[in-house]
Amino acid sequence: MAARIDHLVTSGTFSLDGGTWDVDNNVWIIGDDAECIVIDAPHDAAAIVDEINGRQVKAILLTHGHDDHIRAVGDLFDAVRAPIYLHSADRMLWDQVYSDPSPDHEINDGDTFDVGGVTLKAIHTPGHSPGSVCFYLEDAGTVFSGDTLFRGGPGATGRSFSDFPTIIGSIRDRLLTLPADTVVRTGHGDSTSIGEETPHLEEWIARGQ
């Protein structure tokens, strides 16, 4: 594979429904020495720009619209002038953070994004939010899951615009159908694999949100 995957952790807060929590977020940067794509823009645009290290940014892909994943995207756009992509079903979450500008493009299920000789494919996985999207990089055997799937189970569904049966359906039908050795690179915390998580689906359903 010509491209590589760079990983950055940024720290800040997540706010929704009147509460605020401290969080660490993963930023994933896929590309080669000349160009890259950034997945999510949390907390610290300057740190993301440093990790980009002068490369052309072809796109900023947002896994969903929660403020901890998009808070730095305005400053990141100002620095790198790359188009911002967000699923339209999360526009109400975007609007809680930004009155202007709008995302440059909508993400639709099945959209593809080429960078550094590899292709990312968008997989719409609603549940954590209506417009949650994962990005599958088949060439590297990995999926960037945002807050849909973590080590140990689904993303949270106890807040506005989320739904537990929906996220279970997304994980079961869209993610656990990927090859078992697919590495799951999450929006927070450690990576896992499809094979590690698949046996626990019924446990998650029994546990509930």
Image (cartoon, rainbow, N blue to C red):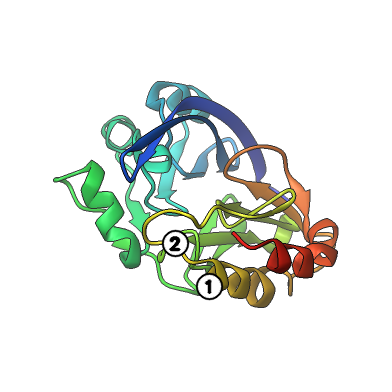
Q: Position of residue 148 (x, y in %)?
A: 58, 57
Do labels 2 and 1 touch, CB within 8 Å?
yes
- Residue 205 higher or lower than 190, as above or below: below
Name the foreground residue: 23 vs 195. 23
In this image, 183 relative to 96: left or right? right
Pointer 1 residue: 166
Q: Which mark is residue 162?
A: 2
The Cα–Cα distance between marks 2 and 1, rounded to whole angstroms, is: 8 Å
- Identify the residue at image location x=47%, y=74%: 109
- Identify the residue at image location x=29%, y=30%: 75
- Identify the residue at image location x=27%, y=36%: 74
- Residue 186 higher or lower than 8, as above or below: below
Q: Is residue 53 visible?
A: no
- Identify the residue at image location x=59%, y=59%: 209
Name the outermost residue toward the left.
99
Mark 1 residue crowding within 10 angstroms, few (<14) / some (14–19) / many (20+): some
Residue 118 figure quarter: bottom right
Amino acid identity at mark 1 = Thr
In this image, 64 relative to 193: left or right? left
Name the foreground residue: 188 vs 163. 163
Q: Position of residue 70 (x, y in %)?
A: 37, 42
Label 2 sits on a secondary structure element that is: loop
Q: Position of residue 81 (x, y in %)?
A: 29, 39
Amino acid identity at mark 2 = Ser
